[in-house]
Image (spheres, coloured by chain):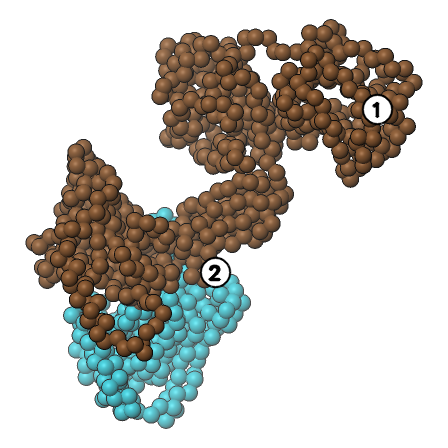
Chain colours: A cyan, B brown
Amino acid sequence: MLSIERHILSVALLLLGSMVFFPGCEVDEFQKLDERNWQLTWSDEFDGAAGESPDPEKWVYDLGRGDNGWGNEELQVYTDAPENISMDGEGNLVITALQSGNSYTSARIKTLGRFAQQYGRFEARLKTPYGPGLWPAFWMMGANIETVSWPQCGEIDIMELRGQEPHIIHGSIHGPGYFGGNPITKGYSLDRARFDNEFHLFAVEWDEDKIDFFVDDFLYQRILRDDVPGEWVFNQPFFMLLNVAVGGNYVGFPTADTPFPQRMTVDYVRVYQNAN
Amino acid sequence: MKIMNNRFAKILPLSVAMVLAFSCERELDDLQPAEYPSNPNVFIDGFSGGLEYAAFGGSVPTAFDVDNEVTYLNTSETSMRFEVPDAGDPRGAYAGGAFFTTVGRDLTEYDALTFWAKASKAANIDVVGFGNDLGEARHQASVSGLAITTNWQKYIIPLPDPSRLTAEKGLFYYSEGPEDGRGYTFWVDELKFEKLGTLAHPKHSMLNGEDQVETSFVGVSKRIEGLSSTFNLPTGVNRTVGVTPAYFEFASSDESIAVVDGSGVVTVVGGPGTAEITATVGGVAAEGSLTIESVGDFVNAPTPVIPQDNVISLFSEAYMNEPVDYYNGFWEPFQTTLSADFEVNGDRVLNYTDFNFVGIQFTSPTIDATAMTHLHIDIYLPNPLAGTARMQLEVVDFGSGGTGVFATDIPASQAQQWISLDVPLSNFAGLGSRAELAQVIFVDVNGNIPGFYADNIFFYDDSTPPTMPATAAPTPTHPSDDVLSIFSEAYPSLEGTDFFPNWGQATVVSEVAIDGNNTLKYTGLNYQGIQLAEAQDVSDMAFLHIDYWTDNSAQLNVFLISPGPVETPVSLTVPTSGWGSVDIPLSDFSPVALDNLIQLKFDGNGDIFLDNIYFRK
């Protein structure tokens, strides 16, 4: 895992370097994107009053502890309480992870049954929480999950972060033959900055041949249909999820030094379709 | 403190060379206002330019040395080695010292002091930080109890506000004692200032982030403690550094009530009123505040008048005090009482807060109070009392005398004024010998005294009877028709007069019979009013007559008061030789409105006996 991150970092640095040296040129093949004509198909700007719950026309709650901590030995109990998830009155949705002794509450919402889309651009502008054991995510799963189950339904993690590394996010996909601890993934690291103290824009652009991953519109990972070691299942509508997990296989347990409460602040979620 | 820079003399030529090199490149046109070097390195492969070391006083002077063997990743040539002594090491009790430069460095472009460190065993270093320049140490910041392991790890000490560090000379300091009595060794390498950019969520605190409220008085000063800055490290955990006041900008919400200076000292300057003291660091509001509820001028406890020869004092400005171990033993685990002693107008006052019980100890030496008869204590309850309080006093003899216990009720009406307790030592139940007294203990029996002030704590010998007039005041002879009497048995006096109005005074008022003649007695006078039931017109009178007696007063004034208040003092000669009788022309009280007299007042000190207070033609 570490070697992968280093590789990606060096690629990113190379890219940055080349941008610096050749500012006016087509940067390189990696960054060369086809012309797009994105048409907004769905969005939530989270403009509600302070304390207001997410729009039930757009979002559904996942509640409780799931099976085996949502499959990852996560520690938190998900609720729909405003102290765990509500608008801040300043144009943001805030998901708050709270500690009470050794137990934790937080929130997870999804668009399953409300909205799903095949292909297009999916983006969220947000500030992450931080601290060992915090695991925020903006991600997607195949809308056929209830009939074919996971990982056959497919999963696209647009943004995941380990709270003990608040300057690194990861973009990943899971599918049959490449899931759990063995996804196709890349990290993206900020230089002398962090994802938890200012807003950043996380996005994927997805078509029938590939999925591109962006931070602040910088393309840091492209996964082609031919890159996956198993079946390409990213050819049906996906729904979106937002959550803040505490503990779990991916991130480890929170420690006595983990500051609580922790918040993920989401400015907006927007979805586009390529009109070309 | 021994300066240990001689061993690093070989470093000096290097730094000179650097300076020369720079000066070669400098053009005259480039000359700028004096700027300090921004060299971030403290110790990489040796001392950086201009760096010196001095061991702290009482520490092992040789605790620090340069190590050529153990270095970070074995890539650097040398590291800093610190040998912490065993307990009882004759060379010193701990390892500690400061690394400093004589020319300041500009650290404004960095956000952290970082280093790699490891130890011969897992330990917690007592203090590690920077800003100790062996001088004023204005911008000191440090981490306490830094956990260190046996593996090389990187440690980060955030700079609370880099913009302040324009010419910093204190680049690193440490202090560490034995762990469980045993010494050990730790190494530090790659010590430098850095711009990490990954420190987040700064939070600054005064008073440890608490919002405190304090009743106070004009003249009281208090330093704001509990200053710290907390940053989230790149690992997602918080690190708190204790900092000096110079990082903070303090402000008072009302400078007519309280002011605060740059070093965080709050001084109450007015009142009654309220002022909130807050602070910012680098423009970020600090958590915590101090709300001063000033009640105005402080009323000092009455000045004791018993001669020093008859007194063994523990705490009083009026006497020589015996050695005291402590005025608050912080007896764990059950004591909650804290101390917030203050000084007002040069008079120190003990201030116990969060009171349940508290003890004063004096064992060096213990006190032989065999010749003493009483314990005197002045106490003041600054908060209103909801009901009757009960203060228990205990006197402890460390010899054979055991513990004596005495308790007294304090009615709610006596809150917020000085109460003078004069307890005969014979009233301390259970106390035998008092030859080796060692403690005085206060206990809140009813649990309703949040705190109290104490002053003038002393034992005294009162075996000679209290001084008082041997005879009654002379019987007045003025015709009754010419007299308007306030206090006298020779004339019918005004009805409804209040001789003990609560004006916040300390004076104890009583009436004593002398030869069967009722006499007004002021004990421990500071001031004392007499409230008439209704306003009197004495404009057709010529004199105020007073008979008075005192053998210990050094000052005594009498006032007449008309609404406004308009009041004028007239000084009375003290002490008296027998009864003194005065007839004061009422014109001496100008500009008091004699046709609308509402009050009389005495002020001064000592114990005063009064009789035959009346107006006459």
Q: Which residue is mark 2?
A: A82
The quadrant of the picture occupied by the N terminus of chain A is bottom left
Q: Residue at x 79, y 17 (%)?
A: B612
Q: Residue at x 28, y 81 (%)?
A: A219
Q: Residue at x 87, y 20 (%)?
A: B483
Callout 2 secondary element: loop
Q: Identify the amino acid type marked 1.
A: Phe
Q: Residue furthest front?
A: B28
Question: Do discs 1 and 2 belong to a common subunit?
Answer: no
Relative to B345, say whether A210 is above or below: below
Q: Do callouts 1 and 2 mark residues in contact (Cβ within 8 Å)?
A: no
> Distance of mark 1 from mark 2, alpha carbons?
79 Å
Near-viewer residue (B242 or A235)? B242
Q: Which residue is mark 1?
A: B543
Near-viewer residue (A27 or B10)? B10
Near-viewer residue (B426 or A102)? B426
Residue A215: x percent and y percent?
32, 77
